Amino acid sequence: MPKRAVTDLDIASRMDSLPVTALHALLVVVCGLGLAFDTFEIVLGTALSAVFSAPPHALPAAQLALLLAAVYLGAIVGAPVLGYVADKQGRRRTLMSVLLWIALMSLAASRSQSAGQLTWLRALAGVGLGAYPPIMMTYLTDQLPPQRRGLLVFAASSVAMLGPPAVIFLVRGLISTHPLGLESWRWAFIVGGIGAAFVGIAFALLPESPRWLERTGQTSAAELSCRRFEESRTVWGQQHGVPSSTKGPALARAGVQRSVATRWSALAALFLLSPWSTTAFPLLSGAVLTQKGFRLPDTLLFIGLATLGSVLGSAVAAPAVDWFERRAALASFGLIMMLSVAVFMVSATPVWLICANVAFGLFASLYTPTLALYGAELFPTSARAGASSAAWALNRIGSACAPLLLLPLLRSRGPEAMLAVIGATWIVSVLVLGVSPRGQQRRAVG
């Protein structure tokens, strides 16, 4: 096809006017695969909660809670620090480094000799695991056309949702065979490490964000990166006119800059509250099922089936994600998650447990990327990675605190007490959504 005309518009306007190209598609696939191995490692914590709750590895509640929380403690440090690095050194370079670090720590974890050593290695891996999602969301928000941004982000999430069922069924499938004398959870770390390394290297095929390059004064590199998109084959849609929000860009960007602190406060509260349901419930579901008397293979089967809800949710919702205002969608997803948790906590039959777990996984897979996308759309390019990652660090604080507080509560007071805490955090989240600013959905984001 003929080359699209290059105008005298700024880089942001040119990027926002593009159709979906083959390079956009490659961007989505590689980022999605990276997120798949990120979630693979995170959901491995759910398998570890089951493995280390049952003989012969049964750990005391405090030690198990620390093991489960370790990855999030590392993320508290990694997310804001690496988000700042991504704003200063570039999104692509940071994402490559993060994935290679995750690979190194995962392979080291596969050789751990004690629960204490494994806990430390999980914390070190968390430095990268906590940083990847918000920086990836920043990278995609910088480069995806606004009219298709939500759909393409959910397409990346759909790829990523293959990670959770892969790790659960891998651990379950190898639980009695011990290939080469290694336990199944060790094989999960090996597979995750090799996969993360492969995707990290694949990022060399992708361009750096043209918006970031332009904002950091690298105009020649920004032009070359932008032309890669403009000259890439169109796979969907057609070139649009300049989005109305890009007219008068200096005024628009100044307005966003003045409200960064206000926007970040609302986003930070939402990120701090969300893991008490989206992270804590899946992470502790293995312990809940064990407490209900289910054997380890059955527990892992239930958890594995539940992860299929995440795959289904992202795939089905992708075409519709841009139809609804982000805040209303978040409130709706949260309500259904809470109903699913309630059914799971009071049920004792496998059918209801599986259905509730699948429903929760489906809507949690919608809630988290919608919240991350909403957050990325709130900020201008110059602050997007740092602001999103700093808010994500609070999410990791909540993720670290949740198992430390909820697992002892589960064992001492039962699932009803755990449900009450999760429900209270969701009610507060709805109140925060009610006063949160509207994002720049379907518009250029600067």
Image (tube, rainbow, N blue to C red):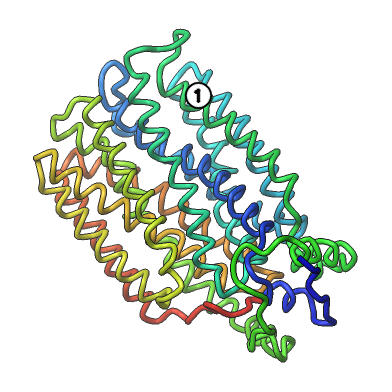
Left or right of 349 in this view: 186: right
Give 235 or 86, whichever is nearer the viewer: 235
Give x and y (percent) for residue 446. Answer: 68, 77
Residue at 74% of width from left, 68% of height from top? 211
Q: Quadrant of residue 166?
A: top left
Left or right of 44 in this view: 16: right
Q: Is residue 81 visible?
A: no
Give the residue number, with chain letter if any, for mark 1: 117
Looking at the image, which residue sits at the far top?
Answer: 181
Give x and y (percent) for residue 406. Answer: 28, 46
Q: Is residue 240 visible?
A: yes
Looking at the image, which residue sits at the far front?
Answer: 1
Question: Where 14 sits versus 252, above or below?
Answer: above
Looking at the image, which residue sits at the far right?
Answer: 220
Quadrant housing the N terminus:
bottom right
Give x and y (percent) for residue 69. Answer: 42, 41
Q: Say what amino acid the circle numbered 1 marks.
A: Gln
Q: Quadrant of residue 440?
A: bottom right
Left or right of 197 in this view: 11: right
Residue at 36% of width from left, 80% of height from top? 434
How many C-alpha atoms fall within 10 Å of the one at disc 1: few (<14), some, or many (≥20)? some
Give x and y (percent) for residue 416. Answer: 14, 50
